[in-house]
Image: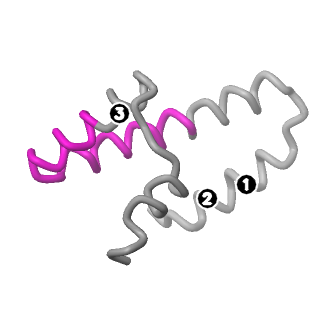
Amino acid sequence: MNVQAEINWIVSELSKVRDPELIKAFKNMLIYRAKHNQVELVDELPLAVQESIKRGVEQAKKGEMRTNLEVKKKYEKWL
């Protein structure tokens, strides 16, 4: 299978589509794929890194975060 030829065909056909629902469905498939690939990438990281990311996400959900400016101000003497 020539992947580039397949992509070209899809682009060509997609440019002819005028159905908003079909466009939305295609967009949702691409978004799902992007999210799915991100999960796989995280799974390949060392366990300690995965746990650190998970803690960071939980802290962000709880509003326990600092802006980049706040962090720079606090640690500027070491930068």
The quarter of the picture where residue 9 lies is: bottom right
Residue 2's label in the rendered image is none
- x 46%, y 63%: residue: 72
- Give neighbour class at mark 2: few <14, some 14-19, many 20+ (Cα, 10 Å): few
**In front: 56, or 42?**
56
Q: Is residue 35 above or below residue 3?
A: above
- Give neighbour class at mark 1: few <14, some 14-19, many 20+ (Cα, 10 Å): few
Amino acid type of the residue that numbered disc 3 sits on in the rendered structure: Val
The residue carrying mark 1 is 11
Residue at far bottom of view? 79
**In front: 65, or 22?**
65
Dot 2 or dot 3, earlier in sequence: 2
The residue carrying mark 2 is 7
In three-dimensional space, the C-alpha distance between marks 2 and 3, rounded to whole angstroms, equals: 35 Å
Label 2: which secondary element:
helix
Amino acid type of the residue that numbered disc 1 sits on in the rendered structure: Val
In three-dimensional space, the C-alpha distance between marks 2 and 1, rounded to whole angstroms, equals: 6 Å
Q: Position of residue 16 (x, y in %)?
A: 87, 44
- x 42%, y 71%: residue: 76
The quarter of the picture where residue 47 lies is: top left
Amino acid type of the residue that numbered disc 2 sits on in the rendered structure: Ile
Which-is-in-front pick, marks 1 and 3?
3
Q: Which residues are magenta?
A: 31-55
Q: Is residue 68 above or below residue 62?
A: below
Q: Position of residue 69 (x, y in %)?
A: 55, 57
Residue 57's label in the rendered image is 3
- x 26%, y 46%: residue: 42
In three-dimensional space, the C-alpha distance between marks 1 and 3, rounded to whole angstroms, equals: 36 Å
Pointer 2 with pointer 1, Cβ within 8 A? yes
